[in-house]
Amino acid sequence: MIQITTSFEGANPHDAADVERTGESAFVIRPYSEDGDDNYKFSLLVGMSNDATRSAPVEFTVDWGDPVHMSCRDYVLLGRGDRWRYFPAEIEGGLARAEVIVPPGRHELALHPTYGLDRLRTWARGAEQGETLRVRELGRTRQGRPILALELGGAPQEARHRLAVMARAHPYETGGSFAAEGALRQLVKMVGASTPPDWYASVVLIANPDGVADGLCKRTAQGGADPSHVGPDCGDPTVVVLHQWLDELRPTLMLDFHSWMYRYEDGMTYTDDALSGRFRQQLETSRDLDRAWKLSDHTAPGEMPAPWHHCRDRFGTRSLVLSFGWYGRTVPHMRRIGVAVVSALAESLI
């Protein structure tokens, strides 16, 4: 017998009434969006269990409640941890219908591989027990969750490169956290091999913990802020903490990791044209970056209160805001992209 649950951290939908059993092995799922913005309405995560001894075919109808961008929702994923399997979905209006083969045991059904606060807590425990990484609480969200940075290097004021890495401002964009993990692993290798360290790095794997915990799409809460597009004047505690972090670090470089629904393009917003050009040249040799770039030039001063604008205008920070699509990629692939990004950035500065 197949059972579905939504009563866990990160689930979307949360309300059990939004999962309707329409047959012994058939369900309708109605995801929700905190603000209805169709450009970000891609959050889906339910848990399920199959208590039989054999795999069972299950029909899922995902009612997105919005026909816009349905070409990006023509599949679902089944899996857990780092292992996921794609199942195609037929689209009819705002509905996506998929037959999913569910093996015995516990699984998750999602639109993207999941990255929850449990992974961040694992990193924090590892940093507390190790010698290379340090974990620092930057502040608390409106709901009281800690915003954590994993840091490495010597004294930041003595480092030639002070790097801020931010991921997961938008909760549904799990690829940002996985890419930032890969970036962090590469930074550990780089900083450990440098004596004295040329780098000081502060890495925030989940910049919006409340949004992640609540299974949101874009904001910190229903009616909350979008951390990528507002400044601290909005008063949202998460946004205030993130800007205080940047003001304290005064980064010379910033990487802001996102993921998006484009299938054949990756995105790059940049605040320094020369760095962006050298960076793209370095990445041309990477097998893991095999898509065209959708570029956005933000070299000129502007009024947009994004974190990278804030740093550019106050500290002259050179920023790269990177968006990578999940389609056709795996969790290990997304981590390798993060490794490639940091390696290319380091080579671009030589």
Image (spheres, rainbow, N blue to C red):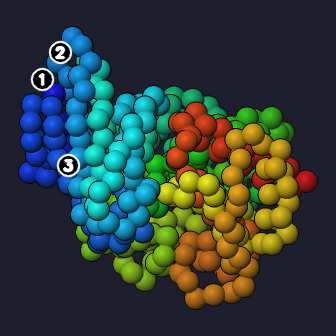
Q: What residue is disc 2 on?
A: 52
Visible residue check, residue 29 = yes
Crowd tier of the residue under label 1, counting other residues whose Cα lies within 10 Å: few below 14, some 14–19, many 20 or above: few
Image: 109 above or below 248: above
Report the residue at 73% width, 35% height from top: 189
Report the residue at 29% width, 72% height from top: 35
Secondary element at image label 2: loop
Q: What residue is disc 1 on?
A: 1
- Residue 192: image x %, image y %? 75, 35
The residues tagged by marks 2 and 3 sit, at their Cα atoms, a distance apart of: 22 Å
- Residue 64: image x %, image y %? 27, 59
Q: For residue 241, what is the image quadrant?
A: bottom left
The residues tagged by marks 1 and 3 sit, at their Cα atoms, a distance apart of: 18 Å
- Relative placement, left or right, of 242 versus 131 is left
Callouts 1 and 3 close, C-beta under 8 Å: no
Image: 322 above or below 122: below
Which mark is first along the chain, 3 or 2? 3
Identify the residue at the far right of this view.
350
- Residue 90: image x %, image y %? 34, 48
Instruction: Give amino acid for label 3.
Output: Ile
Secondary element at image label 3: strand
Nearest the viewer among 213 and 61 is 61
Instruction: Give amino acid for label 1.
Output: Met
- Relative placement, left or right, of 28 versus 296 is left
Secondary element at image label 1: loop
Report the residue at 49% width, 70% height from top: 228
Q: What residue is disc 3 on?
A: 29
Nearest the viewer among 265 and 178 is 265
The residues tagged by marks 1 and 2 sit, at their Cα atoms, a distance apart of: 6 Å
Q: Residue 78, labelled with which disc?
A: none
Visible residue check, residue 154 = no
